[in-house]
DNA sequence: AATTAGCACTCATATCTATTGATTGCTAAA
DNA sequence: TTTAGCAATCAATAGATATGAGTGCTAATT
């Protein structure tokens, strides 16, 4: 059976209602609040048909209807109303981004914060795959007799959390020269290119083999860990505000998922070139025992350069319309962010 | 009335029992499991007396007794048995520290992780007050035309997350010279000394006033924020495993407290020179609305240098004996950690 | 004087039953 | 095709009753 316009209206009513109340909705309520032109009996007939088709469910015989994941899918793909953010919400968002933010992780952290604050859901942000990042320069700074700090400046941000062990006899000057050499060799290359072993630069290998290998290893580690350490969570406690997690066991399962960041990362990765990604229930390839949930993420860009994904994770019953509006608006805000310098650098 | 030895035994029995079961304990159970030589009637008389004295409570007339915060205080101060960690627990702890850890925050993160894993409680770690940290050297590295990275090497670790804005005309060499100048001026001074304005070094102010001011500001910010960003939480979800947080509302209050890190920091600060700090219930100067909890923290040192506090936060009913043993053992482990280099540096 | 046995009393908790009311599905009329 | 009307279903609620764990007190015992 095809879905008539009336059936769509009814699905929309059920989803809209369920999103705010988290209670099964009855035929009478639908008539009252959404479709007064129909009688409750007619609506009941349609409800029965929609249940047959897999869009609705009844918790028990004499209760109202509840949307299935299928219904949400249809809703977000086709029925969802465009929502306008309130003056106040816009104000909050703008406040978060009104001052200069230069570091990618700072931007992402702020993004996650504001998303969580406005949607009242737990939000997540992941730093992007760095394979495509273009190296600007490499600096190696001697910290003490045993270690030196490696700073990798790329168009996507600065990587500065890695140290290498060194021989204590080497002086500051050595590292200045080494930085220059290695910088020159890496400049303009992407991380991906640098990691391809056959493209190693021979002349550097001779003079600074040790350092060179150490740096390659640092980069490799960083890319392979996929920035697992750099996933940002905001508002974990908000999970507990949702009625579906009133049961402590469910809440715990969800929180444990959030804590296990390496399990979370693959769920947040969205396909290339998709600006908005909505995964509902089974769309998430989660193993058994995983709590049911929905994930909505957006890919964010600042001045055309992707800086990562951010979004929300929460119960399947969430206010998709609001979430989408927020993610969307933030996307627009970021794109005209007052001159973050990552991009500038590339143009030089 | 003074507390007789028998009363102490009874308090110990009540606390021991309540720690594992989280259920009121009856006179009969005490006789059965702890003091078979007494009759339940005698125990009842003692229980009544202890209730009078404020050590015990009854949830309702016909229920068993439950310890008050006072009883826990007495317990940890005087009655608590020394507990030996199991072979397996020792193995877990040692595994966490068997490889070289050079960065303070790495050590603290690992410490928090292992504490949470073994105690099954939420654990926290805070970086120490840096006022007393001795500066080794300062490096300023030009990242691009707009900003430079400031790296402050101290005996307590490396501070490397601050950037300063710069004039684009300045070249790499300028910063090398500047680093040397400023390094020389700061070397051997504590952060506290550097921040005292009357001790500013005049000659530097002339040549590198701009940079100098920026760096002072960075240090000031860092010290004043007290490393708020650097509080480490592990195992937040474990809160929900405790029966006292079976009520979702209580659990949420607790999780929100954990998320509000700046509220958490003062609660974790312990007095100078106290290696182990146990705060139970009202000992925490928490505002109204704060969830009741207990906090046990230890101050950790690596080769004699304090690297910060770590411990657990959880319900007042927690296994203090186990927690104390774990914190204690980790303290010993850290103190003989295979040559972390912070300390080495000072001796040179 | 301290301890204990015995018993009445208290009160949270579990269990059962009856009632209510929201909501549906179905049938028959419009 | 739509709708009114009505019996049927079943979760949720309330009340009534029973259960039993545990105490406090008194009087007997050591």
Image (cartoon, coloured by chain):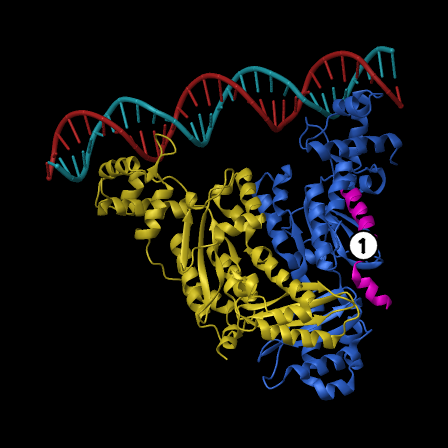
Chain colours: A blue, B yellow, C cyan, D red
Report the magenta residues as a range.
Answer: A323-348
Q: Chain of mark 1?
A: A
Residue sticking out furthest to the bottom: A206
Q: Which residue is mark 1?
A: A338
| Residue B53, x across and y down, in percent | 29, 37
| Residue B31, x across and y down, in percent | 27, 43
Q: Image height check: is A29 above or below B160?
A: above
| Residue A303, x across and y down, in percent | 84, 57
- Predominant secondary structure in magenta? helix
Residue B327 in the figure: left or right of residue C18? left
Q: Quadrant of the N terminus of chain B?
A: top left
Q: Nearer the viewer, residue B40 or A311?
A: A311
Q: Image height check: is A38 above or below B103?
A: above
Q: Image height check: is B282 above or below B329?
A: above
| Residue A115, x across and y down, in percent | 72, 46
Q: Nearer the viewer, residue A311 or B264?
A: B264
User: Toward which corner of the image does residue A156 lie, by quadrant?
Assistant: bottom right
Q: Does A194 lie within the magenta span?
A: no
Residue name at image x 63 percent, y 84 percent:
A171
Residue name at image x 33 percent, y 39 percent:
B56
**Which element is circle 1 on?**
loop
Residue B328 in the figure: left or right of residue B34? right
Q: Nearer the viewer, residue B57 or B201?
A: B201
Q: Image height check: is A205 above or below A281?
A: below
| Mark 1, other Cα within 10 Å: few <14 / some 14–19 / many ≥20 | some
Residue A227 in the figure: left or right of residue B17? right
Residue name at image x 56 percent, y 73 percent:
B187
Q: Does A341 lie within the magenta span?
A: yes
Residue B231 in sight in this render? no
Residue B56 in sight in this render? yes
């Amino acid at each position: 059976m095809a879905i008539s316009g009336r059936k769509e209206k009814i699905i929309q009513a059920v989803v809209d209602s369920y999103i705010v109340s988290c209670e099964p909705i009855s035929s009478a309520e639908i008539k009252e609040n959404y479709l007064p032109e129909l009688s409750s009996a007619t609506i009941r007939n349609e409800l029965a048909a929609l249940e047959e088709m897999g869009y609705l469910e009844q918790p028990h015989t004499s209760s109202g209807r509840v949307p299935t994941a299928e219904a949400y899918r249809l809703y977000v793909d086709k029925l969802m109303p465009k929502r306008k953010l309130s003056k106040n919400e816009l104000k909050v968002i703008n406040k978060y981004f009104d001052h200069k933010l230069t570091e990618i992780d700072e931007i992402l952290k702020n993004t996650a914060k504001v998303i969580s604050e406005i949607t009242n859901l737990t939000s997540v942000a992941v730093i992007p795959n760095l394979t495509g990042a273009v190296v600007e320069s490499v600096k190696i700074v001697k910290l003490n007799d045993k270690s030196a700090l490696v700073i990798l400046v790329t168009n996507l941000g600065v990587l500065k959390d890695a140290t290498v062990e060194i021989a204590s006899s080497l002086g500051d000057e050595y590292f200045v020269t080494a930085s220059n050499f290695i910088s020159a060799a890496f400049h303009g290359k992407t991380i991906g290119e640098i990691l391809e072993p056959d493209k190693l630069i021979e002349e550097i290998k001779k003079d600074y083999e040790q350092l060179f290998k150490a740096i390659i290893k640092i980069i490799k580690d960083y890319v392979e860990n996929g920035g697992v350490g750099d996933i940002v969570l905001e508002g974990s406690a908000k999970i507990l505000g949702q009625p579906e997690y009133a049961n402590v066991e469910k809440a715990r399962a969800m929180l444990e998922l959030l804590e296990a960041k390496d399990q979370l990362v693959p769920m947040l990765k969205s396909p290339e070139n998709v600006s908005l990604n909505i995964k509902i229930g089974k769309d998430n390839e989660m193993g058994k025992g995983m709590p049911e949930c929905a994930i909505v993420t957006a890919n964010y860009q600042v001045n055309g350069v992707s800086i990562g994904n951010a979004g929300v994770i929460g119960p399947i019953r969430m206010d998709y319309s609001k979430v989408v509006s927020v993610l969307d608006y933030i996307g627009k805000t970021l794109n005209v962010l007052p001159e973050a310098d990552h991009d500038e650098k590339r143009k030089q």
